[in-house]
Amino acid sequence: MCGISLIYHNAGSTPDPAIIARMNLALQHRGPDAHDVLCRGAVGLGHTRLSIVDIAGGAQPMLTPGGQWAMVFNGEIYNYRELRAELEQQGVTFNTRSDTEVVLHLVQREGVNAPQRLRGMFAYVAHDLSTDTVIIARDRLGIKPLFYHFDGTTLVAGSECKAIFASGLVEPKLDRNSIRNYFTYQFAIAPYTTFEGVRELPPGHQLVIGKGGAPCIAQYWNLEFPRDGEYESLDENFWTQKFADALEEAAATHTIGDVPIGSYLSGGIDSSAMAWLLTRSYPDPLQTFSIHFTNPSMDEAPIYREIAKHLHVANTEITMDDDRPEGYLNDLERCIYHLEQPQRMAVDIPHFLLSDLVQKNNYKVVYTGDGADEILGGYDCFRQDMMRIWGNAIADPVQRRAHYMSEYTKDFSRDFVQLLLELHAPQRQQATLEKFGCYPVWFDFWNVTADHLPGLFSKSFEQATHDNSQMQSLIADMKPHLDGRHRLNQSLYIETKTRLPGWILWKSDRLSMAHSVEARVPFMDHPLVELAARVPPDLKLNGMNEKYILKKIAQPHLPQHPYEFKKRAFYTPIREWFFTEAHREGMDRYLSTAALEDCGMFVPARVHSLYKQLLAIPAPRDGNEYYRVMKLEWVLMSVLTVQILHAQFVRKQAACFSGLPHTVAAPPQSGSGLFKRLFGA
C-alpha cells in the first residue's frame, strides 16, 4: 500500500524532480518504508512505499526491461499469482515477486484492457516513454483513491489532494457546491471534490492522456443489477451456498503478503463474520482490535469480548473516554487533514485512533467489515423504506398518520417519524420518484437537518451555489441503470455511485493510511459484489431483517448476540467532545465571528444561535430529545469541519504546505471569545 504522484506536461517538457519530491513528502504517511522519484519525457512519477508484498524487491517507480514502460502503483492485487503464471507462459521474465511488476507487464501488453483482469484494490499510473502517453486507472469500487487537476497544459495527480497542493502548481480553494452538498448528502458528488478544480477519477474508470492532449476518461466497469423477474433462482439454499462460497473465497484471497494480518472487531455481524472467516483461512493466530467506550450507551465491549473469546482470538482495545482531559479537537483536526472533507459526525476519531493502535502493535494490514451494509441493505434507512411501502398501502390519510405515529415510534423518535410522514406523503413521494427515477432510501436521511439550514449560509455562498446541478447530472447518468430494477436494488446501485466510495471507503482508506496501515475490505471483492447484486432482494432485506443472507451464513458460528446482530448505528458523542464550556477555547479558534467571516460561507450570528441552542438543552431523557440534540450537533459539526478545512488548506496551515509536523495555527480572531459573547462568561 502506497502513495503515488504524477506530473504530466502535455507540451513535452520534463517535470522538476524537486516538485515530485515535495508531493512524496505530503504522502509519506501512506508509505514510510521507502520513497523515490522518476522524471523522464513529459512525466514525473513519485512513490512512497508501505512494504507488504515482496518487501525486498518491490521498489517503485518500476520499469520494464529497456525502460519503455514505468509504473507507480497503490493497492493489492489478489489474483497476481495467477496473472504472473499466465504472463510467464507468454515469455515474460520477472525480476521481483511483487504484484506491481505483474500489473506493469499486464499494462504493457493489454493497455487500457488491463484493469478488467485485476482482482483487488488499486490505483496506478503507467507511462509509455515511446509515445509519452500516460494511463491512470482506479479499482472498480473506489477502494483506493486517485485525484487530479488539469489546467489545459499540465496534469497533476496523486493519492490525496494534499499531494496536488504540495506541488505548488495548484492553489487550494474550497468548492462551494461540494460544501453545500455535504450539508445535505454527507458526500461530494463525484467527480467533484471538496476542492475547486480538483477531481477524483471515478471508480471503475481510467484516464488516458498523450502529447498535446487533454485527459480522456472512460469507464471499464459498472455494477449491474438484474431486472425484476430475471433472477437466476429464487431458492434460498441455492443463494446461501453461492454467497457462502464467494464470501469464504474473498476472505481467503485477501490474505496475501509478507506481514501479519489483524482484524477490526466490533459487536456487529460484518466484522464478526470477517474475524470468523480469517480464523478459517489465515494460518497464524489472529489478533483483533476493538473500540471500548466509557459511555455505556455506545459501548459494545461486552459483545465483542464474548465474540473474541468464542473465536479464540486475541483482542486489544482502545478506550474512548468522554472525560478525556485533553479532549478530541486535536484528533479531529488530524482526521480532517487526512480525510480532506467535512464531516457531520465524530465517528472518524475512534477509527483514526484505532488505526494508530494497530500500527503501534506492529501490524501493517487489518481486515474490516466495510461494505457489507452497502451491498446487502444493512442500514436503518432500508428498513424505513419498508415502512414507506407499508404506509403506502393505507389510503386514508388519518389512518396512515395513526399507523405511523403508533407503529413506527416504537423504533424511531416521534419527530423523525413526523418527518417521514411528511416526506412519504403521496405528492412528495411522486416528486422524489420523478427527480431520481426511484425513491432513494437515503432521501429521508438527507432531509434530517433541512430545518436548521435556512439562514446558515452567507449571501455570497447562497448566490454561488444557487444553480448547483452536480446531483442532477449524476442522476441523469444513473437513471438508465435504475429502470426495471427492484426498489432495493435501485438504492443499492445509487450507493455504489455516491456514499460507498464518497464516504465509507474514503474513510476506510484515509483513517488507516494516516497511520501507515492497509485496510482490506473483503466485502468489496468485486466477484462478491457482483454476486450480491444478483441475489434476490428479500434475501438481502427480509422484511425488517437486514443482511439476512450474511446472518444466515455467519451467525451459527458466532456466540448468541443480545440483539441478534441487528444493525446498531455507530455513533460517538459530539456535544460532550466539542461543544461544552470546557472546550470553548478550541471552538473559538474556528467559530468566532472573525474566523467565520474569514471563511465567508456562514452567517456568524446564525452559527452562534445554533451553538447556544445546543448548549442550553439539558441531557436528553428519551429518543425524541436526543434526535433534537443530534440535528444541532450535525449542523454545527459540519460547520466546524468546514472551518478546519479552510484553515488547513485555504490558509495553508497544514503540513503539506511546509513539510513540518502537522500543526494548526489560529485563524484571525476578534476581541473576546465566542463563549463570552454568547453567555457573558
Image (spheres, grey):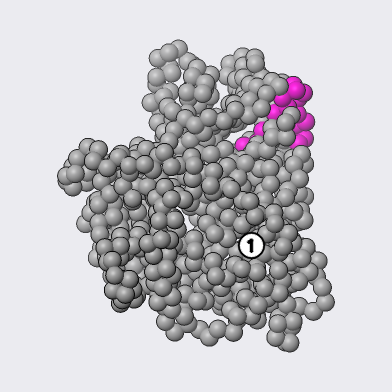
Quarter-wise, where is residue 9 in the image?
A: top right
Quarter-wise, where is residue 153 in the image?
A: top right
Q: Residue furthest right?
A: 671
Q: Residue furthest top?
A: 91
Query: On screen, 112 above or below 607?
Result: above
Residue 237: where, in percent of width, then height?
17, 46
Query: At label 1, which amino acid type do we have?
Result: Thr
Residue 148, visible in the rendered structure: yes
Quarter of the image containing the N terminus? top right
Q: Kindly identify the residue that appears in the image at 66 percent across and 27 percent down.
A: 214
Q: Kindly identify the residue that appears in the image at 49 percent across and 42 percent down.
A: 476
Q: Name the residue that disc number 1 marks.
A: 641
Q: Kindly identify the residue that appears in the image at 42 percent across and 82 percent down.
A: 622
> What residue span does the magenta drawing correspond to?
2-19
Front residue of this view, candidates 485 and 543? 485
Q: Kindly identify the residue that appears in the image at 58 percent across and 16 percent down.
A: 65
Front residue of this view, candidates 163 and 283? 163
Front residue of this view, candidates 440 and 581? 440
Q: Secondary structure at mark 1?
A: helix
Quarter-wise, where is residue 217 in the image?
A: top right
Residue 309: where, in percent of width, then height?
31, 63
Residue 550, visible in the rendered structure: no
Query: On screen, 298 above or below 539?
Result: below
Q: Is residue 641 left or right of residue 423?
A: right
Residue 628: where, in percent of width, then height?
50, 76
**Residue 580 is inside the magenta segment:** no
Q: Is residue 642 left or right of residue 364?
A: right
Residue 175: where, in percent of width, then height?
67, 50
